[in-house]
Image (cartoon, rainbow, N blue to C red):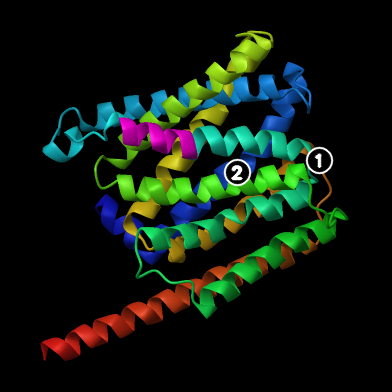
Amino acid sequence: MKIEQWFRHPAGIVISAVVATMLWGSAMPIIKIGYEDLGIGAADYGAQWLFAGYRFTLAGLLLIIFHYLVTRRTATTEHRKKLGKARLSRLAFIQTFLQYLLLYVGLSYSTGIQGSIIVGSTSLFQMLSVRFVNSAERLTVMKITGLLLGFLGIAAVGIGKGDLSLSFGWGELLLLGSALFGGVGNVLAKQESRHEPVLSLTGRQMALGGILLIVVSVPMVGAAPFAINGTLFMYLLYLAVLSAVGFGIWNTIMKYNDVGRVSMYLFLIPVFGVILSSILLGEQMSGWVGISLSLVVSGILIVNRSVTVKTMVSRAKEDTQHS
């Protein structure tokens, strides 16, 4: 099966989206463990940004190398296409630099579940921002229903952890900004993937965004505020690989599918985060996680059902016009 066929097939979409969101969900517990082992405090923004900068620069380089190895023997005009520096810089600035610059500070000022709910709004921002690129993708009643179920699913995790609170301050505002840039960046990556292969595009923008994070943080904390040892490289390598694989898969899913159809899968990230935190950090997990997963999956099914019906109606109209 060709790559495009896999990422357009219903089973391919589900499996690929679950893999990507599970990898992203594993990032938070691994980051928490890594920060503790490396002595990076919750308010050490400079060290956190520097760690993220090294992570995304390495992830980008891994993707660039992988793309080169895969395509060097079958190089075509399509593979040689490259996005211009200005548009690549815009994508890197939005999807990697601004999204993660705001995310790390926002998480320090927000509760875990409230942060997860706000970060989950990336799905909403994807659906809203795609309207500027493709006016055919509308925010229908079914999509809104799916989004509400997704937000309720994340809230159910908070009820189970006893961590559901309602407040809005600087932390929540920064997380909302991060979700906005994440959603816009994902849609922008979908648009730009028409001008450069996904793996090359994702790798180059991540490497550039990582370098920007390093440039901002080095004047604050220096180039190595944490010990340079095997532990550091172990965490960096895992987080770089999950970022490279996760973003590589997700941007490919976005390239071949309607944004409204796949955005709902992003609600799985905090659910997987809670499950994996329970496994890796020994945090308590209640039966509410099952309810949460059921709500998110229901939202995904509703949205995909609406997209499938819309596609069938469009095809029926086309067949009628041709007959």
Q: Is residue 201 something that shows in the picture?
A: yes
The quadrant of the rendering that contains the N terminus is bottom left
Vertical placement of 287 versus 90: above or below? below
Please name the amino acid that badge 1 sits on: Gly
Q: Amino acid type of disc 2?
A: Ser
Q: Residue at x 60, y 58 (%)?
A: 267
The quarter of the displayed image where residue 80 is located: top left
Q: Give the residue at mark 1.
A: 282
Residue 90 located within the stretch drawn in magenta: yes
Looking at the magenta stretch, what is its main secondary structure? helix
Locate residue 283 relative to residue 38 in the image: left or right. right
Which label number is shown at residue 178? 2
Residue 235 seen in this snapshot: no
Judge left or right: residue 15 versus residue 219: left
Whether 103 is drawn above or below 168: the answer is above
* Distance between mark 1 and mark 2 Cα atoms: 28 Å
- Residue shown at 24%/43% (left/top)? 195
**In the image, residue 165 lies at what x, y percent?**
85, 56
Q: What percent of the width, then of the height, locates residue 31?
A: 68, 31
